[in-house]
Amino acid sequence: MILENFYTIETQEVSNDKSVVSTTIVVNKNHDIFKGHFPDNPVMPGVCMMQIIKEITESHIDKKLFMEKCSNVKFMALINPKINFKLQLELNISEENDIIKVKNISKFEDTVALKLTTYYRKIS
């Protein structure tokens, strides 16, 4: 985990065919990153959301990954960790020609905060 103590996994469910991982995380609203992004008005950095998705995927497939590219990246709502500290991430994971493709929808309550498709290459 790159950001030590940034979030914890509360629940995780995996589909029978192992292609869908549904994870609920709890963000540490007191983490130092929010002091700089932004003081008195914390917002989850988009790059941190992307890193969380990568870490969950790595854990699921038990391999280290390198992000090759992203497409259809849509940040749709700001995540204030003091208000919306519990997030649900749904990852649809597939593999083709040694490339791991992850389609993600991240949300809090009924609000979609992020949609993206990411392509990773295995590095170990």
Image: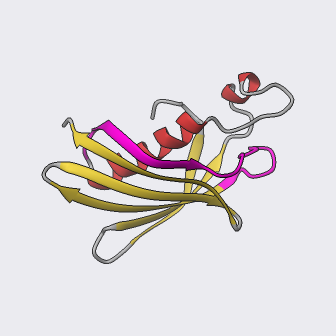
Q: Which residues are magenta?
A: 63-86
Q: Residue at image x 46%, y 57%?
A: 104
Residue extending furthest toward the front: 72
- Report the quarter where the C terminus lies: top left
Q: Is residue 97 magenta?
A: no
Check the image and name the residue furthest to the top: 36
Q: Is residue 44 above or below residue 21?
A: above
| Magenta stretch holds residue 71 | yes
Q: Against 46, is 34 above or below?
A: above
Displayed quadrant of residue 25 = bottom right
At horizontal 58% and vertical 35% (from top left) the residue drawn is: 5
x then y, percent, for residue 90: 48, 63
Q: Residue furthest left?
A: 97
Q: How many marks?
A: 0
Q: Nearest the camera: 114 or 13?
A: 114
In this view, the residue in front, 36 or 61, is 36
Q: Position of residue 119 (x, y in %)?
A: 31, 46
Percent x, y of residue 39? 82, 25
Camera-side residue: 71 or 61?
A: 71
